[in-house]
Image (cartoon, rainbow, N blue to C red):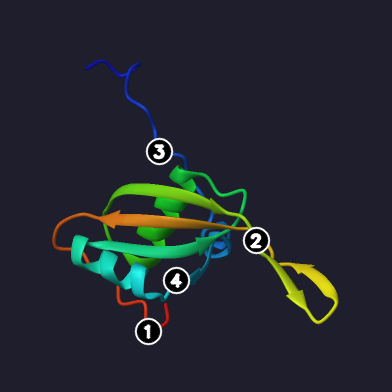
């Protein structure tokens, strides 16, 4: 393969990587993903898949094999007579390479 066909990984600043991942998702469905070597995170709405991959690899020192993202629309909720809207957010399901794990119950 020639040098022209190789793609370079984008370089991100460490401070930018800390702002990408907002929180781990701790739900029954998200914890079932750990059986398939997957971890679920809440991420910024404008985060791209390569940026999420770089953030997880850089912050947790693991190898990521895939990233799937979901834009979750906020529910309309009613409290007494007032209608409200929950915020929209983005979820990332990160698949780790074999032999790599992340313990989301501990801090970075």
Q: CA distance from mark 2 to mark 1?
A: 28 Å
Quadrant hosting residue 60 = bottom left
Which mark is drawn over residue 74? 2
Query: Mark 1 or 4 closer to N-term?
Result: 4
Quadrant hosting residue 83 = bottom right
Q: CA distance from mark 3 to mark 2?
A: 33 Å
Nearer mark to the viewer, of 1 and 4: 4
Nearer mark to the viewer, of 4 and 2: 2
User: Residue under circle 1?
Assistant: 106
User: Residue under circle 4?
Assistant: 25
Query: Mark 4 or 3 closer to N-term?
Result: 3
Residue 63 in the image, given as x and y percentages of width and height: 26, 55
User: Residue under circle 3?
Assistant: 9
Residue 71 in the image, given as x and y percentages of width and height: 55, 51
Question: Number of callouts in the render?
Answer: 4
As helix, strand or loop, the secondary structure at mark 3 comes to loop
Which mark is drawn over residue 37? none
Q: CA distance from mark 1 to mark 4?
A: 13 Å
Quadrant hosting residue 37 = bottom left
As helix, strand or loop, the secondary structure at mark 1 comes to loop
104 left or right of 33 in image = right
Q: Residue at x 75, y 74 (%)?
A: 78
Q: Quadrant of the C terminus?
A: bottom left
Q: CA distance from mark 1 to mark 3?
A: 29 Å
Q: Badge 3: few (under 14), some or many (20 or more) residues near its Cα, within 10 Å?
A: few
Viewer-side residue, 36 vs 47 = 36
Q: CA distance from mark 4 to mark 2?
A: 16 Å
**Circle 1/circle 4 CB separation < 8 Å:** no
């Amino acid at each position: 393969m020639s040098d022209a066909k190789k793609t370079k990984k984008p370089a991100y600043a460490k401070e930018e990587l800390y702002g990408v991942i907002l929180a781990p998702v701790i739900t029954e469905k998200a914890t079932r993903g750990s059986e398939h070597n997957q971890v679920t995170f809440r991420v910024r709405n404008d985060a791209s898949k390569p940026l999420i991959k770089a953030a997880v690899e850089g912050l947790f020192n693991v190898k990521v094999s895939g990233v799937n993202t979901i834009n979750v629309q906020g529910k309309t909720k009613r409290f007494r007579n007032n209608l409200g809207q929950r915020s929209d957010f983005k979820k990332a399901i990160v698949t780790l390479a074999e032999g790599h794990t992340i313990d989301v119950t501990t801090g970075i």
